[in-house]
Image (cartoon, grey):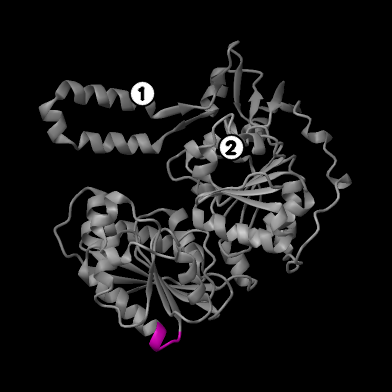
Amino acid sequence: MEMKLTTPTKIYLPSDAKEVVSFLTFTDKSVIFQLDRLKKNFHFKRNDPEAFLERVEELKQNQFKSLVFYDDQGLPWTYSGLAADLTKQFGWKLTDLTGRSKIDLESLPLLPWANIPHKMRYYQEEAVSALLNSGGHAAVELPTGSGKSRIILQLIKEIPEQTLIVTPFTNVTKQLCSTLEYYFGKKYVGQLGDGKKKTDKMITVANAQSAAKIERGSKEFKDLKTIKTIIFDESHMVPAESFKGICLDGVGSEAPFRFFLSATQERNDGSGKVLTGVTGPICYSKQYKELAEEKFLKKINAKIFKVPTCKSSVIDAKKETRSNLYENPHVARLAAMLADKSWRAANRKVVILIEEYSQFLLLKNHMTIPYKFAHGTVSKDAKHALPEEYWKCDTDAIIEEFNNGILPCIIGTTAISTGVDIQPTGTVIYLQGGSSKTKVKQGVGRGTRPVGPEDLWVCDIKVVGSPILERHANIRANIYQEMTDSPVQEIG
């Protein structure tokens, strides 16, 4: 039986039999989470039982999501990235009707370097080769710090066609745009986002939010509609709606070459099939432990420090994390002490990762070494939570001071915990909590580049007396253990 790839994003299915629909259906864990929270809302249940039951039933009907869709003629189709999975499951063959296979990459002249980058590492070369030989639609999974930007440079050189590169955050966009300008020259590179709309260049770097909002008929849409290649950097961080708005419905929907790079090609909400449908299969991957053993990344030495609760525990995970981790004075004092010992006793530069402004306000009262606070734009609604003196922040300048040896410590929010090039870190103090493997690995990645000390100290917190926070800390300990051969120690 034959699947037909009619556009870069859509394959028509030869069957929508029960077993096919079942294979392309997943459980949306975010809906399960909403349902669980709703059932604990006794106030709603007691005061409006009819509306409560209606909402419960609505969520139950939405917990299972099918990726079999139908066009106007009733013909079944699904996302193109699932072609390999369907071939493996049902033995179907894929016929490519997009004309992508007719593009002869070898006949295209390579884009010249303005400045020659360093020679690729063996695994970077293998990743580029795997993507170019994937048929034009695939993903690569490489740990943070392993040099995915070098892979992006090479892909552009090998496919010298109009390209859109999408990043999850503005600071990553600016950093990557600067890198591309240096190696290819400013005449080839434009930027979309952060107040800039330069989309008429051969290479456009855009943050996902800006790219997803491009309206049909706009100058930006006309500039980018003819792109041949779309590359996502840290693709796991892009929200599903932005993926859809860029790859399926927007400016990237007709791009024949589609490449996705990330340290963690996974989702925590059960929507792995959706991610694969957009990104295609993982054609190349390397594990952190392997690259650390080969000295391309630092080896990790992780310790979990125990502290007591400061408030009565609650059953709501978010409230419990806020009250007994983020707003826990024992945590702030310990983190400041660890930062002091790392810098003064071991000459290790420190990155402290936090989730909320309240953590910074506690921390700053105990810090004894020089530091700066790096964060994203403070929204109007959030300004009440942070003194005005901290509203403005030049994250790029702070990171430059840190990388150049001027600043020994950065306290940073999620604005610096993904994709940002922080180099000489000796210690990461992880105070963001939770149990997300993606988030933990990205956070640790702020110190894994082989610059500075030979290994990386990772310090985490277990709040003893809170079942929820103890469980989360145990999960994080297992994540650290996956990344290192050294045993993860509990202290206290």
Residue 113 image offset from top left, x and y in percent: 78, 61
Q: Which residue is depicted at the point 37% across and 81% down?
A: 370
Figure quadrant of the C terminus? bottom left
The first of marks 2 and 1 along the sequence is 1
On screen, 26 above or below 72?
A: below
| Amino acid type at mark 2 | Val
Residues drawn in magenta: 343-347
Identified at 72% across, 55% down, the residue is: 187
Q: Amino acid at mark 1?
A: Gln
Q: Nearer the viewer, residue 196 or 170?
A: 196
Q: Nearer the viewer, residue 164 or 36?
A: 164
Q: Crowdedness of circle 2 by 10 Å Cα count: few (<14), some, many (20+)? A: many
Residue 24 vertical placement versus 314 (above, below): above
Magenta span includes 63: no
In-image side of 382 versus 370 (left or right) = left
User: At which x and y percent is residue 111?
Assistant: 80, 54
**Residue 486 visible in the shown view:** no
- Residue holding disc 1: 61
